[in-house]
Image (tube, grey):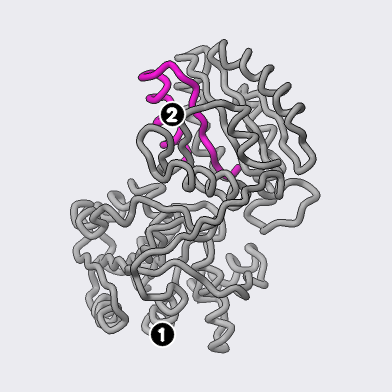
Amino acid sequence: MKVESLVNIIGAQFYTGVPDSQLKALCNYLIDTYGIDKEHHIIAANEGNCTALAAGYHLATGKVPVVYMQNSGEGNIINPVASLLNDKVYAIPMIFIVGWRGEPGVHDEPQHIYQGEVTVKLLSDMDIRSSIISADTTEEELKEVMDGFREELAKGKQVAFVVRKGALKYDGNVVYKNENTMLREEIVKHIIQISGDDPIISTTGKLSRELFELREAFGQGHEHDFLTVGSMGHASSIALGVALNKPDRLVWCIDGDGAALMHMGSMAVIGANAPENMIHVVVNNSAHETVGGMPTVAGSIDMVGIAKACGYRYAVCVDSFEVLDRELAAAKARKQLSFIEVKCSIGAREDLGRPTTTALENKQNFMRFLNG
């Protein structure tokens, strides 16, 4: 189905969400049509953030908003759905569009398998009536479903479209880019050359995939690295937990801008605890690149200023490899909580692979390394 048909049938005037590769057609359509526009489309930090933002839109306008997300974001919406939107509380109507990663019977990465199994059940448990959109769903079928949904929305309830892989199409060509020149894979390469035998916790998406392949290219083992293949936004908290309990180890967290934004409160907790043995690197391309390249707000905020305000003892932004190497080496020697923002271009190798070890093997190898 063409995404324009879905948008026309829904008839909403405001969309907010966190981009998802399964919903790339919708994301590209919204960027092509509205860009980032206060009246029609805002990409928010996390899915709970989107839900609250959409609730505010409804309170101000009386209209029904749409929140889009990957199904991994369902956990982030449980609190606002149950304690804000629900018809036993404020009865705020809302339409969710959920990309179905890990759908049973469809091959996907390990972090999506269980989430895929419970996607529809979680919606039901939250009293959200849902309908599945497949590649063969017709406009007539979608209109009939939407007619039923409108009755639910009129009661102050929420509804959801669960979108299968390949169900939506968009013919527009959207190109995402920025003015930065440093490639992320090369940035990761420089980090591991300086980190040596130190443990690394890496964020979800292409960054962890690049870290894995660089270890392979260098003939190194993978026991130094904990690849946070799911749980977006939590790599820095995992790193904090490791650093506090292994004070004799220098712990590196290689984060992404979208992930850092998603749960930015973790930076305040890290700064308050101020472990001397932690280095937090945020590779900032101002984009949700792993799921398509849609923009984040990280290009227009002061990440270094935020880190300093949160209590990081040292914080700096770099945009060249010469300065990066100098700051990485200084951080390694500093024995002080450090934050390094690295300005990065958008793009990755077309042949970028995925980890060949399982998530459980990664955990076990990493734990043996930490305690060896």
- Percent x, y for residue 252? 38, 70
Query: Residue at point 47% right, 56% down?
Result: 288
Q: Main secondary structure of the magenta part?
A: helix
Residue 84: horizontal and vertical position, in percent?
Answer: 45, 21
For mark 2, give the secondary structure.
helix
Rendered image: mark on residue 193: 1
Q: Is residue 325 left or right of residue 150?
A: left
**Residue 79 appearing in the image:** yes
Q: Is residue 69 above or below residue 326?
A: above
Q: Secondary structure at mark 1?
A: helix
| Label 2 Cα neighbours within 10 Å, binned few <14 / some 14-19 / many ≥20 | many
> On the rendered structure, is 17 left or right of 24?
left
Q: Do the CB atoms of the residues marked 2 and 1 lie less than 8 Å apart?
A: no
**Residues rendered magenta in the picture:** 47-71
Q: Is residue 211 magenta?
A: no
Q: Position of residue 19 (x, y in %)?
A: 51, 48
Q: Residue at x 53, y 61 (%)?
A: 205
Question: What amino acid is labelled 1 in the image?
Answer: Gln
The amino acid sitting under disc 2 is: Ala
Pick whichever, 139 or 61, lies toward us: 139
Task: Identify the residue position indicated by label 2 in the image.
Answer: 54
